[in-house]
Image (tube, grey):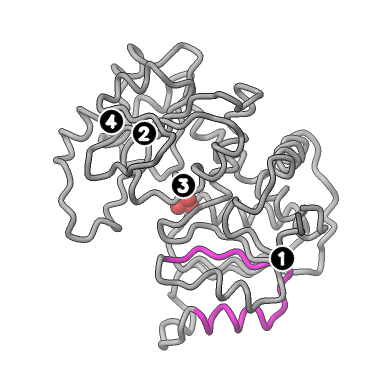
Amino acid sequence: MPAPKSILDLKSLSREQIQILFSRAQALHLQPEPTNFAGQTAALLFFEASTRTRFSFESACHRTGLGPLVLDGAKGTSLEKGETLEDTVLNMAAMNPSVMIIRSGKDFPLPQIAERLQMPVINAGWGAYGHPTQALLDALTLKQEFNDLDKLKVLFVGDIRHSRVVASHFELLEKLGAEVGLSGPEEFLIDRPGTHLFKRLEEGLEWCDAVMALRVQFERHGSQPMMNKDEYRAQFGLTRHKVTHHLRPKGVILHPGPINYGIEMDQEVLTDSRNRVLRQVSNGVVLREALIRSLLEGRL
Ligand code: CP
């Protein structure tokens, strides 16, 4: 398989390459690597809001020695004067960063732009199409708990239709041999062969080893009607009662963040001993560092 120039999705990464990334990320938790890329830069272009992804990539850059050039929304940039996103990317690329990390909406032509650039591009969340590094860090978190993801049962709950995280997990978890379950209101479900559908969340919780609650993506719904929020919480929210009575004692609770408390997850579930939401965030730093290093070293 040829070395991928960019990471726009997870289709082009083999199971072996993914395991190498996990091992390197795990090692970075224990032992920092030298800042081999001092004097080089990385462009972080976030055309949509972000906390975890942006700061973890920025942190990863500092750990490698790369100087991060961060665009955080339009404010203070020439986007405010009407410059296009495409021109912004091309101008930043002309400053020759070693890698471009881009978060953008669904209308941004990410693959076409990446094709025109000389440096690798990493998708940091693109519309509802994918969020590959989020899926990788989630899977690393599961690997730390269960060691092997083969046959692991992972349940996604909620706004599956609009979730780029789930889109990337379809590529990743199936490649790693995990079984995928889906539960949520009918308007948020999709028909995906090979997945297990659970009309009642309680049944899904009893089936799974790990459950990931998804953020309800109000900003992507347009005029699509949604179930009343209290009804949503009652049926599909991770409440203390549901996880106490239906999730196995060694189960794991995940959420990619940010969390709508009182809708897809209750605040008190954050302190459940099985909750790994903040571990996901820590893993984001080392996973993204491992990815940047491996890409720049031509090891992927
Ligand atoms: N999980 C995730 O992408 O979070 P942010 O939007 O804060 O980056």
- Name the residue tied to disc 2: 182
Q: Label 4: how many residues lie within 10 Å, few (<14), some (14-19) or many (20+)?
A: many
Q: Looking at the picture, which amino acid does disc 2 mark?
A: Leu
Which residue is under mark 4?
Answer: 237
Q: According to the image, label 3 marks what residue? A: 165
Q: Position of residue 159 (x, y in %)?
A: 32, 43
Element on which disc 1 rests = strand
Q: Residue at x 64, y 66 (%)?
A: 121
Q: Which residue is pictured at 76% across the width and 58% down the height?
A: 3
First-in-chain label (2 vs 4)? 2
Check disc 2: other Cα within 10 Å, few if <14, some if 14-19, many if 20+.
many
Mark-to-mark CA distance, 1 and 4: 41 Å
Residue 64, percent from left and from top? 77, 55
The yes-or-no answer for disc 3 within 8 Å of ligand 1 is yes
Q: Is residue 299 magenta?
A: no
Q: Nearer the viewer, residue 31 or 122?
A: 122
Crowding at dot 1, Cα within 10 Å, few <14 / some 14-19 / many 20+, comes out as some
Q: State the separation of the CA atoms marked 3 and 4.
A: 18 Å
Mark 1 and mark 2: Cα distance apart in space? 40 Å
The image quarter containing residue 174 is top right
Q: Is residue 90 left or right of residue 203?
A: right
Specify which label sits upstream in the sequence, 1 or 3: 1
Read off the magenta span. Answer: 86-105
Query: Which numbered mark, 1 or 4, is in the foreground of this view?
Result: 4
| Residue 14 left/right relative to 181 | right
CB under 8 Å between callouts 3 and 4?
no
Amino acid type at mark 1: Gly
Give the foreground label among 3 and 2: 2
Q: Amino acid at mark 4?
A: Gly
Where, quadrant-wise, is the N terminus in this rendering? bottom right
Residue that numbered label 1 is attached to: 67
Q: CA distance from mark 1 to mark 3?
A: 27 Å
